Amino acid sequence: MRTRPSRLVAFLFLATVSTITFEKIHWETGVTVNLADILATLFVAGYLATRIADGDAWLPRTAFVAAAFAGAFLLVYLIGYFNLESEQALQQFVKGVVKFAVHFGFLIAGVAYLARRSQRFYWTTLGAFVGGMAVNAAYGLLQLAAAELGYDLDGILLSPLTGGASSINIYGAVEGEDVYRPNALTGDPNHLAIMLVVPLLALTPLYLRLERGHRLKLPLAALLSFLLVMELATLSRSGLVGLAAGLVILAFPYRRLLVSRALLVPLGAVGLLLAYVVSRRLDFFETVLRQRTQTRSGSTSAHFEVYDFVPDVLGSHPLLGLGLNNFSVYYEFVTGRTDWGPHSFYVALLVETGIVGTALFAAFLVFLFRRLGVARGLGRALAAARDPLAARVRPLAWGLTAALVGTMAANAFYLTMQFYYFYVFAQLALAVPIVFARR
């Protein structure tokens, strides 16, 4: 009797994980409803229904701790409600609380769900997550090619589906030629770049530790090369900062493998491809790169200027901030601009939730790092027992650790850590010690 609903729950879970970065697929119904919102809500409802039907109330300890964090966050947000000062602020607060509930609900249910499934299903989930990002990046490549030919791929494919407007990002122009930055199915090229940091860093150690001749060796090399090309195509400085920070972490356990033939050959192929593309439009790319490496440009100044708001806000609401999801309201009140977000996760965290909320989120990150530390310890234990699974678990744990560090570094000037994909990433990180400790 459970076969059919179990299959449906598994489908909803994997569908959510694979489409979690498809930000542009959303509909306006008074509020913005993403495809991921719908799928995640259906999964949580379906999973709870099967658990209730089975009379099964068991939760792994990790899910309990995550639920405790969710309760603590909600308490901070609800107390911060009393700092709201307008109807607009209340509307933004309600939107923020709803998003938070869906995000953390999916995180908790997902950890509990993975704890019940096999190691094979965990790898399937990781594959769905990475595969969804690969599809997103592939759309970005098609989007870029179409734009160069004079077509708006979003207008052709997405607008009829969603009824909304979206398009590739135009950074500017060089001698009359537009400079395109693919944003794919995300809302911003920088979002795409920071999201791609996760599969690039998480998969690299797994790829390096695969045995010579393994059936996945060549496909992973091709996938990582493609994702790196798309990372560079976004022209995102934050994405590259995150990638560099994660590689520093990987250099500790894999410093020799990072300069091995297995990695240098794909990197060389990417370098040759880029050299060919740049050589055909040398003046164009030289101008673009010069602009992107300037530190005194208007966009760079704006990224740093948002940090100036922190002392002002903490001076008036130091403990709990202005209220969840209210930075945009404050920014509009101060500057009159409605088209500019905080452009820093840490600024948004401090401004919206104050010192208490920031300390709580720091504790949540410590929780993630500690669970990844347990996963790395599990990998060492498996290696000591001469278990071949060690060649998968330890690289996975190191890759996820590097991806977490890279994401944190990139969020100094963007705020993707409040997006759906980060909660799926956290879900995968927290589930590693549970799933593989059974060995």
Image (spheres, helix red, strand yellow):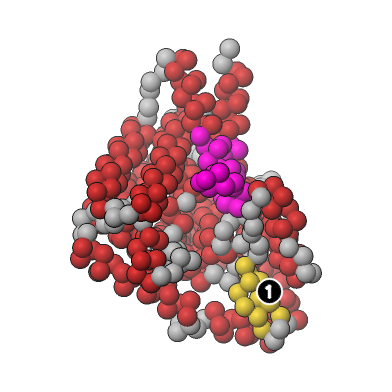
- Residue at the (57%, 64%) spot, across then down: 189
Q: Which amino acid does label 1 sit on?
A: Leu
Is residue 146 on the magenta stretch?
no
The picture places residue 271, in percent across and down from the top left corner, at 66, 73
For mark 1, what is the residue? 274
Q: Position of residue 434 (x, y in %)?
A: 42, 34
Q: Give the range drawn in magenta.
A: 14-41
Q: Residue at x 38, y 60 (%)?
A: 329
Q: Does the magenta stretch include residue 30?
A: yes
Residue 227 shown left or right of residue 410 in the figure = right
Front-most of 130 and 433? 130
For residue 75, side relative to residue 35 (left or right): left
Q: Dot 1: what SS?
A: helix
Q: Residue at x 53, y 41 (%)?
A: 37
Could you tell me residue 156's position as x and y percent? 75, 56
Q: Which one is in front, 216 or 326?
A: 326
The reply to whether residue 76 is in sight is no
